[in-house]
Image (spheres, grey):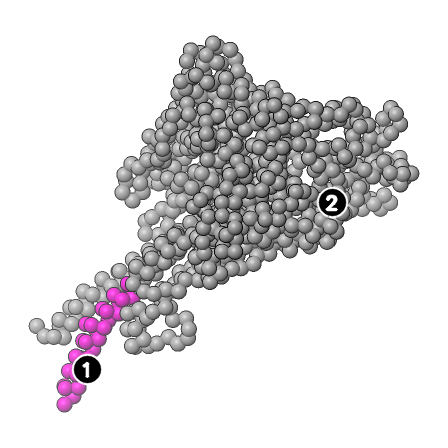
């Protein structure tokens, strides 16, 4: 054979191989790119869903009410699909097409979660009545929607008739329902703490003080800026709405019935008394002829209290009647009540569970370590979650060293996380598996393996988790992934991480706008060692708006006026709120008053070497513990009717 | 005479076809596969930052090691855009009818590396920050050398293996 022929044969063999290989690798790169692109689109859509939820809840005074929550979640689902569809627009997918690839959306909230997914509606409406279908056939097409709320629940059994169900939340608030070993009913709810952390002899109802975690909890002065609206009498005898003031004004407030009640110092002044046209029509005078200058807000509208209401408020603050209330004793007592109630509840709880040999009855909890899923590549069965084991009885031994349920590192907290995950996991598994019934795309929908960090995020935050599966991409592959976005700014849940400290405001705007607020774990803040710190929830540092329609009395023209303001002015510190490099302590350090862990000593730069083994200052701890207790205590809780302590 | 010329030409062509073409094509494929590996490593690295909220020494080293194992040298460029709502806040505080805007300030590779190489061992981010990582090779791969033999691409943008990925951070790092 001639050399030329060999060459030709060689080329004939190599060229096609090279071409095919080239095509294959190009396709593979394409697949990778598409996957990355879909990941981004999914994550962005989930982000949009979280933003929508934040936008709808943060500025709505009633967002924690259940009806409002469902509406907000439906809106969030909508924006998720809209965002996904616009992201996918270039790939030719419409919103309707995409529903077939989203087997589930998970909305975890403070005390339970909502699942959005596929279900079969067995109720039809005819003649205005519900008509239940009895056949189990799959002829009806499925619907998608938000399914009923599921609580984070676990059931325990002990000796005799001991059988309790505990509803967990994202923090140490629990609801216990059931019977003790002799069959007596025990229905209580409250914050579970290590009662030895509260000095029992220090509890003083009259002054509202006690000592918890070694710091003095006492009534505190709170205040915020507001742009409020008043209903005012008009010249024609009608009433209309008008801004109380068009720039934010500072008001002192206390929490009462989970609501803020403000003291208005201006309405007692002569300038307003002389000008009845400017006074809110809800403003009343008491039997002694004095005006009652306390109000609460009803969607930015100031509603002044009646004499009876203000007396109730005065009693709550430890005063005999409302005339006693003034700016000096208008102090909030929530933190005191938090620790007092938690102390009593925790003691009752210890009495209930002590000496019991508890075992978990809840199936999903016991099964959680047996769950497996199918490894995509190899088809192998692999465990969904692996975990350390511990004795359930140790979990409720809350007086044990290091097991204060308020601490992040406690065994109680670990068990709480396990309960939450097991509940979510079993329900997610079934909802995603059920998706196969209605969507025969040839792809087997199944719960993917979530990493331990992701589970941790879910069990400690209000989150939105989205799953997207079965989307065909090139090379005969399917896209399958999930994304998790935490919602750290919400009114439903005060996490250990959501308290921001600042110097107490003076009430003068020009002063206060120059202030800086810090993360309580910040080293700079610790160095400053101010003794006039106050903590507020991070939500109170977010922008608020007040808007109303102003109607021109003559032309009846309507203009909407909107004012934006921040309840707490000043700017975030760059070392801990905007950037995060000076956050040194853990929240457990703050609560317990311990120094940062020795392995973290290396965090310090040379110039700061004197801080080796530093502990957070007592001023910071006091402000942090008080603020955290206060904000937690005033959360709206559905199971609060089991709280028999206040 | 003309026969000799044709033979020389044929040998020349055969040499190109038999050695250089397969070599070029194989080295191109190698570059493609390298790109794939680097791209997926970059995506993983950025996604890890997004879901943990921190850039640690460990994950950065891992990332660099993964991409270096492809046999090329790389230049890694990182950018973190930190969400700063203070300027927007100041606008709103001065003018109540205006909604402020959020600004981002950026930190780049050297600043980020300084921070993760310090004692802290990590750079912590917060929810809403954005992170971008882009990678390109700095050496001349065999594919580039062979291609330059026939034709060369002028300009700075001569990297053959490139990857970049970016996204919003989802959790508070610390």
Q: Position of residue A68 (x, y in %)?
A: 61, 33
> In terms of image quadrants, where is residue A291?
top right
Task: Name the foreground residue: A313 vs A451.
Answer: A313
Left or right side of A633 for A7: left
In this rendering, is residue A557 above or below A646? Answer: below
Find the magenta span and give its range: B1-30
Judging from the image, mark 2 belongs to the subunit labelled A
Q: Which residue is depicted at the point 59% across and 23% down?
A: A200
The overriding secondary structure of the stretch rendered in magenta is: helix
Q: Same chain for marks 2 and 1?
A: no
The outermost residue toward the left is A1
Q: Is residue B132 visible?
A: no
What secondary structure is marked by label 2?
loop
The residue located at (74%, 35%) in the rendering is A262
Location of residue A127 by image quarter: top right
Q: Residue B4: say if magenta.
A: yes
The residue at 82%/30% (across/down) is A292
Image height check: is A312 above or below A241?
above
* Left or right of residue B69: residue A232: right
Q: Which residue is mark 1?
A: B9
Query: Badge 2: few (under 14), some or many (20 or more) residues near its Cα, within 10 Å?
Result: few
Q: Which x, y percent locates residue A525?
A: 60, 48
Q: Residue furthest top?
A: A182
**Which quadrant is home to the C terminus of chain A?**
top right
x then y, percent, for residue A596: 49, 43
Q: Name the front one of labels 2 and 1.
A: 2
Residue bearing mark 2: A506
- Residue sitting farthest toward the bottom: B1
- Residue A176 lies in the magenta-colored region: no
Tell me the element at label 1: helix
């Amino acid at each position: 054979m001639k050399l030329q022929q060999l060459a030709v044969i060689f080329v004939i063999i190599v060229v096609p191989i090279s071409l095919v290989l080239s095509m294959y690798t190009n396709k593979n790169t394409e697949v990778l790119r598409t996957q990355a692109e879909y990941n981004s689109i999914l994550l962005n859509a989930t982000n949009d869903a979280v933003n929508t939820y934040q936008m709808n809840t943060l500025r709505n005074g009633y967002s924690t009410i259940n009806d409002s929550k469902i509406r907000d979640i439906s809106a969030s689902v909508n924006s998720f699909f809209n965002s996904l569809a616009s992201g996918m627009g270039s790939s030719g997918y419409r919103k309707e097409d995409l529903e077939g690839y989203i087997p589930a959306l998970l909305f975890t909230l403070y005390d339970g979660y909502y699942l959005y997914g596929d279900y079969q509606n067995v109720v039809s409406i005819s003649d205005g009545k519900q008509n239940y279908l009895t056949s189990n056939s799959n002829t009806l097409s499925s619907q998608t929607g938000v399914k009923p709320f599921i609580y984070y629940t676990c059931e325990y059994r002990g000796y005799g008739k001991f059988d309790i169900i505990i509803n967990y939340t994202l923090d140490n608030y629990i609801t216990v329902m059931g019977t003790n070993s002799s069959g007596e009913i025990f229905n209580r709810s409250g914050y579970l703490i290590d009662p030895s952390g509260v000095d029992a002899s220090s509890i003083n109802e009259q002054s509202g003080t006690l000592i918890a975690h070694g710091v003095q909890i006492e009534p505190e002065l709170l205040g915020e800026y507001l742009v409020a609206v008043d209903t005012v009498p008009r010249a024609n005898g009608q009433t209309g709405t008008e801004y109380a003031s068009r720039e934010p004004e500072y008001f002192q407030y206390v929490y009462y019935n989970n609501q803020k009640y403000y003291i208005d110092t201006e309405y007692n002044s002569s300038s307003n008394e002389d000008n009845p046209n400017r006074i809110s029509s809800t403003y009343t005078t008491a039997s002694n002829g004095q005006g009652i200058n306390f109000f609460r807000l009803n969607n930015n509208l100031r509603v002044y209290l009646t004499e009876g209401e203000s007396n109730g408020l005065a009693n709550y603050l430890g005063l005999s009647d409302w005339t006693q209330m003034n700016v000096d004793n208008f102090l909030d007592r929530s933190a005191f009540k938090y620790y007092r109630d938690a102390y009593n509840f925790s003691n009752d709880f210890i009495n209930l569970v002590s000496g019991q040999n508890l075992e978990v009855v809840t199936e999903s909890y016991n099964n959680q370590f047996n769950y497996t899923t199918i490894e995509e590549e190899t088809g192998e069965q692999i465990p969904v979650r692996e975990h350390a084991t511990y004795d359930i009885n140790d979990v409720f031994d809350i007086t044990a060293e290091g097991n204060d349920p308020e601490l992040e590192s406690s065994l109680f907290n670990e068990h709480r996380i396990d309960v939450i995950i097991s509940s979510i996991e079993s329900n997610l598994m079934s909802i995603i598996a059920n998706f196969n019934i209605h969507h025969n795309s040839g792809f087997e929908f199944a719960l993917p393996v979530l990493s331990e960090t992701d589970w941790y995020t879910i069990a400690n935050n209000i989150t939105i988790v989205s799953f997207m599966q079965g989307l065909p991409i090139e090379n005969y592959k399917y896209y399958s992934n999930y994304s998790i976005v935490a919602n750290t700014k919400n009114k439903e849940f005060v996490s250990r991480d959501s308290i921001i400290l600042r110097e107490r405001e003076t009430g003068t705007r020009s002063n206060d706008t120059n202030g800086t607020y810090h993360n309580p774990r910040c080293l700079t803040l610790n160095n400053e060692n101010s003794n006039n710190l106050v903590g507020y929830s991070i939500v109170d540092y977010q922008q608020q708006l007040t808007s109303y329609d102003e109607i021109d009395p003559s032309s009846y023209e309507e203009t909407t006026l909107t004012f934006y303001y921040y309840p707490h002015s000043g700017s975030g510190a760059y070392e801990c709120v905007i950037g995060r490099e000076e956050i040194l302590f853990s929240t457990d350090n703050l609560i317990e008053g311990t120094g940062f862990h020795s392995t973290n000593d290396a965090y310090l730069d040379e110039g700061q070497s004197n801080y080796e083994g530093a502990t957070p200052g007592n001023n910071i701890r006091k402000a942090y513990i008080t603020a955290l207790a206060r904000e937690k205590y005033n959360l709206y809780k559905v199971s609060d009717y089991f709280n028999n302590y206040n | 005479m003309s026969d000799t010329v044709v033979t020389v030409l044929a040998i020349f062509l055969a040499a190109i076809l038999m050695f250089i073409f397969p070599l070029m094509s194989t080295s191109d494929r190698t570059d493609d596969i390298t790109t794939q590996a680097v791209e997926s490593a970059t995506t993983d690295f950025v996604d890890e930052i997004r879901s943990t909220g921190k850039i640690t020494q460990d994950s950065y080293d891992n990332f660099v090691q993964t991409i270096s194992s492809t046999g090329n040298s790389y230049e890694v460029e990182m950018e973190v855009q930190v969400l700063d709502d203070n300027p927007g806040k100041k606008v709103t505080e001065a003018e109540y009818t205006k909604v402020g805007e959020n600004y981002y300030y950026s930190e780049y590779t050297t600043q980020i590396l300084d921070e993760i190489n310090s004692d802290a061992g990590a750079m912590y981010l917060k929810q809403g920050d954005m992170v971008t990582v882009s990678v390109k090779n700095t050496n001349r791969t065999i594919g580039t050398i062979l291609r330059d033999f026939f034709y060369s691409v002028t300009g700075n943008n001569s990297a053959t293996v490139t990857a970049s990925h970016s996204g919003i951070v989802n959790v508070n790092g610390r």
